[in-house]
Image (spheres, rainbow, N blue to C red):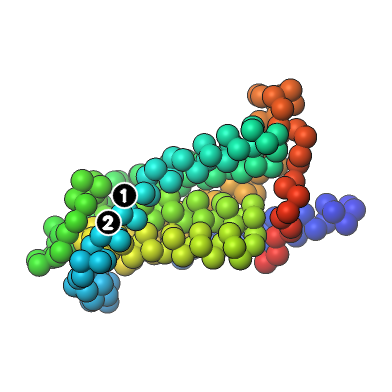
Amino acid sequence: MNFELSSNWRQSGRLRSAAFFLLILFAPSALMAQAPKWDVSLFRSINDSRSSFKDGFVGASDNLVLPIAFGTPVAFAGAGLASRSAYTFDTGMLVGVSEALAYVLYYPIKNYVVKRDRPYVALEGVHTMHMDSADKYSMPSGHTTAAFAIATALTLRYPKPYVYVPAYAWAAFVGYGRIYLGLHYPSDVLAGALLGTASSLAIHLVAPQLTKLREQILGDDIGIQLTAVPNLIDLKVEF
């Protein structure tokens, strides 16, 4: 095995370990149909800290989650086609597949395994906003799952501070906002963050296979084969 293959194998092993560790952390939370006392206490401290500024800022951020979730993979894929960059195109593909895997895992866990009531159903005196973005159950937070899937997928593709710092700051703020809006407990947000992160790590492990599949379906004659790696970004991933 040459150095390059050995390095890729070690990196793959570290990613597998990270994904497994995150899933182990997530599994116990899926057993809690009712929020524990610490969860309720932390929820109250965030949900009760009201201000008109936060109402507007959190509300605007929450409204952007779904457009960003749908728009990010489309934007990268489109930019890849326009710039003839296979790496950029594949980034859009991998972000989209990461989000899809996260949803496939999130939906049955939320609706058939945990089935935790929303805070405003289980508790009294909850401040609520954006009720139209809430379905029946609470754990895990779907908005947070999507946000962390996107943030992790982008970080793995572009492991630079100017990418992962704002990406994870945004994802964390999405989770905070879901608590502030009265729609999720902190543990719902934590579970969503772990699930979204683990989903992107899992997809990153099979990224080469997905790229080959893309080549088989779309071929190399669609004009995205000219640049395999963006010129200005060092893509070495270290753990």
Residue displayed at 51% across by 62% down: 166
Q: Position of residue 150 (x, y in %)?
A: 50, 51
Residue displayed at 74% across by 46% down: 229
Q: Quadrant of the C terminus?
A: bottom right
Q: Amino acid at mark 2?
A: Gly
Check disc 1 and report its element: helix, strand or loop. Answer: helix
Residue 236 in view, yes or no? yes
Label 2 crowd (10 A; few <14 / some 14-19 / many >=20): some
Label 1 crowd (10 A; few <14 / some 14-19 / many >=20): few
Query: Is residue 231 toward the left or the right of residue 162 in the image?
Result: right
Q: Is the residue under label 1 in contact with that under label 2 (CB below 8 Å)?
A: yes
Query: Is residue 161 toward the left or the right of residue 55 in the image?
Result: right
Mark 2–mark 1 distance (CA, rounded to whole Å): 6 Å
Q: Amino acid at mark 1?
A: Asn
Query: Is residue 42 toward the left or the right of residue 191 in the image?
Result: left
Q: Position of residue 5 (x, y in %)?
A: 83, 52
Along the line of sight, the residue nearer the viewer: 7 or 148: 148
Q: Which residue is mark 2?
A: 59
Q: Which residue is mark 1?
A: 63
Figure label count: 2
Check disc 2 and report its element: helix, strand or loop. Answer: helix
Residue displayed at 51% across by 59% down: 167
Q: Position of residue 179 (x, y in %)?
A: 27, 64
